[in-house]
Amino acid sequence: MTSHQVQLLFIDLGLILLLARLLGHLAARFNQPAVVGEILAGILLGPTLFSGVVSETLFPSDIRPLLTAMADLGVALFMFTVGMELERATLRGRSRVTGGAIVGSTVAPFLLGIGLAFYLLRTHEARHTAAFVVFIGLSVSVTAFPVLARILTERGLSRTALGGIALTTAASVDVVAWTALAAVQAAAGGGGSHWRVALCVPYVLVMMLAVRPLLRAVFVKNGEGVPFAPWHLAMVLIGVLLSAAATEAMGMHFIFGAFLFGAIMPREKTTVLRTEIEDRTGQVTSLLLPVYFVVAGLKVDLGALRAGELLELGVILVVAVAGKFGGTYLGARSQGLPARPATALGVLMNTRGLTELVILGVGLQLGLLDTSLYSLMVVMAVVTTAMTGPLLSRIYTKPVEVPRVPRSADPEPAASSSA
C-alpha cells in the first residue's frame, strides 16, 4: 500500500464510524434500532447523492477491496453470534401457537415471494431462473433475529410469553432461510465445482460430533463452566475463521461456516463464559459492521431509479409486508392466539435489518440480483425494519396478557407470562 492509500483508508474508517454512530444515535432518538441509521449512513456515502462524486472520491477502486475484507470479517463474526443466539432461542419450548407462527411466517411470504420473482423477471434478467425465484422468496421471508432480540429487550418483552414465541419463531425461520440459501448458492455457484458442496454434509457431522464435544471439554470442567480467560476468545476466533474458510473452500459462502461454529458452541453451564465471548466479539463487530453497511451502500444508487422501478419498489414492499405480517398473524390466530398479540407478533416478524443485507449481498455476489434490484431490496429492508418500532408502540401501549395455552397443546408453565 502507498502512503496515500494508507491515509485514505484511515480517513474512510474514521468517517464511517463517525457517521454510523451519529445516524445510529439519531435513529435511536426516533425509537428506531441503531442499525437503521447505520444502513442509512452507508446509503448516504454511496452513489445516491451527488451522482457518485462523494463515493468515488472517498472510496476509490483501490481502497474498496480493503474495506470489503474488513466488512467480511465483521459479517463473519456477526454470523457467529447469530449462530449462538439462534440455538439458545430454539431451546425455549415450542407450542402449537409457535408452530403455527413458524409455518405462517415461512410459507406465506415465500409463496408470495415466488410470485414477486416472476413479476420481477419481466424487467430483470436472471442467469439461473430457478435460483432467482427461490432467492426472492427467501429474501422476503427472513427475519432479523438479532435486531428483533434487541427490540424485545429494550421494550421489556424478552421474558414474556409473546417474546418467547417471537424469538423461537424468528430463530426457526432463519434456520430454514440460511439452509435454503445454502442450497440456492450450491445451485447458482460457478463452474463444475458443484461436487465440493457435498463436502458440507460430512463437515457438519464432524463439527457436531467431534468439534462440539471438544469445545464442551474445554469450556466445561467438573460440571461447571470454566472462568473466562483471554485464550478462550482467541480459540473461538480461530475456530470461526477456519470454519468460515472451510465452507468458502467448499463452494459455499463463508457466512455458513461462521454461523455453524456459533451454533455448536456449548450451552451447558457456560452462560457467563459465553456472555464474555459475545461481549468481546460484539465490540469488534460494532466497529466492523458499519464498514459493511458502507460497502453495501456503495452498490445502492437510488438516484438512478426510474418511475417503473419505483412501481417495483411499491410491489416489493407490499409483498414483503403482507406476506410476513399476514402469514404470521394467520398462523398464530389459527392456533388460538388473540388478535392483539397476534398482530404484535406479525409486526415483530417483519423486522429484517442486517440479516437481510447479508442475504442480499450473497445474491448480488452470485449474480442473482442486478444493481437496481439490489437497491430496491435494500430499501425494503430499511423500511420494514423502521416500521417495527412505531407499529409496536401503537399496538402495545399497554401490557397485554397472553392467555394460557391448553396443556395438551403446550405443557410450558411459562406460557402464562404477561406480554
Image: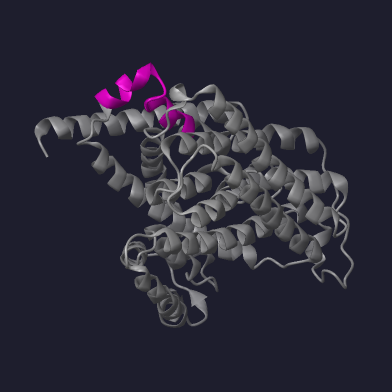
107, 398: nearer the viewer: 107
Q: Of all residues shown, which one is farthest toward the front?
A: 122
Query: Residue at coordinates 67% horizontally, 53% vertically from top-left?
Result: 111
Quadrant of the image occupied by residue 211: bottom left
Give yes or no for residue 366 being in the magenta stretch: no
Res 199 seen here? yes
In the displayed structure, would residue 373 be above or below residue 181? above
Quadrant of the image occupied by residue 121: top right
113, 249: nearer the viewer: 113
Quadrant of the image occupied by residue 200: bottom left
Give yes or no for residue 56 being in the magenta stretch: yes
Measured as percent of width and height from the top left, residue 210 is found at 41, 82
- Magenta residues span 39-57
Query: Residue at coordinates 74% horizontally, 51% vertically from top-left?
Result: 328
Q: Characterize the magenta stretch by its predominant secondary structure.
A: helix
In the displayed structure, would residue 241 be above or below residue 396? below
Q: Of all residues shown, which one is farthest toward the left?
A: 2
106, 413: nearer the viewer: 106
Query: Residue at coordinates 53% horizontally, 25% vertically from top-left?
Result: 26
**Left or right: 353 with respect to 151?**
left
Measured as percent of width and height from the top left, residue 303 is found at 45, 22
Measured as percent of width and height from the top left, residue 362 is found at 43, 51
Query: Residue at coordinates 23% horizontally, 30% vertically from top-left?
Result: 60
Res 212 seen here? no
Q: Quadrant of the N terminus?
A: top left
349, 411: nearer the viewer: 349
